[in-house]
Amino acid sequence: KNEVEQSPQNLTAQEGEFITINCSYSVGISALHWLQQHPGGGIVSLFMLSSGKKKHGRLIATINIQEKHSSLHITASHPRDSAVYICAVRYSGGGADGLTFGKGTHLIIQP
Amino acid sequence: DTAVSQTPKYLVTQMGNDKSIKCEQNLGHDTMYWYKQDSKKFLKIMFSYNNKELIINETVPNRFSPKSPDKAHLNLHINSLELGDSAVYFCASSVSETQYFGPGTRLLVL
């Protein structure tokens, strides 16, 4: 069964802390996505990775294809980073078959 | 100039009714999707539609049917609504691998 596992499920941290959220998947993928969902419900795509590392502002995403693992890091965390972060993968094999999602990590950054 | 839009934003209806949710994208993308987010916030693919090829997640009941009048639209029609259909439904479109999500439609079946 193709599954996407995220950890931790919930994370509360103080403002300024370095945050790491992990994602692992079970079979070969063509791409891995990190998504952000704010309390209002909208979903925003943060990164799409197929290899290596990407950085956008205080956010860094890495992927290790051999280990089938990705991490999302947030440096100098801020209360506005509080959201649910979702890892999603597109499995190899072609076809327009959408994304398979992890269950999300609920992040709260306290001031 | 919203990229992916959905209507309505909220939908409250009685069990047994038939309803539709509309999705439009102005990005010129070839592929569109419908996802369902359940009460535990877990997202799951329902359909993908690319150049008139429809791929259906096998777990989706046949009461759900996507309809695409043109490349920019993928509407979701639901027959005989059930309590368990209550969820947030997200439309998305993509080019290559990047996906753009609509704002979601919160459906409540009473």
Image (tube, rainbow, N blue to C red):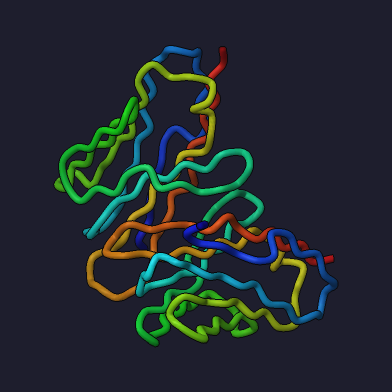
Query: Depth check: B58 or B73 in front?
Result: B73
The quarter of the image holding the N terminus of chain A is bottom left
Query: Depth check: B50 or B28 in front?
Result: B28
The structure residue drawn at horizontal position 35% and vertical position 36%, both measured from the top left corner, is: A22
The structure residue drawn at horizontal position 72% and vertical position 63%, both measured from the top left corner, is: B107
Left-right relation of B75 to A4? right
In the image, residue B98 above or below residue A12 = below
In the image, residue A22 above or below residue B95 = above
Left-right relation of A64 to B52? left
In the image, residue B29 above or below residue B105 = below
- The spot of residue A15 in percent (x, y) is 49, 13
The structure residue drawn at horizontal position 81% and vertical position 80%, both measured from the top left corner, is: B16
- The spot of residue A69 in percent (x, y) is 25, 42
Query: Depth check: B30 or A19 in front?
Result: B30
The structure residue drawn at horizontal position 56% and vertical position 12%, both measured from the top left corner, is: A111
Left-right relation of A21 to B96? right
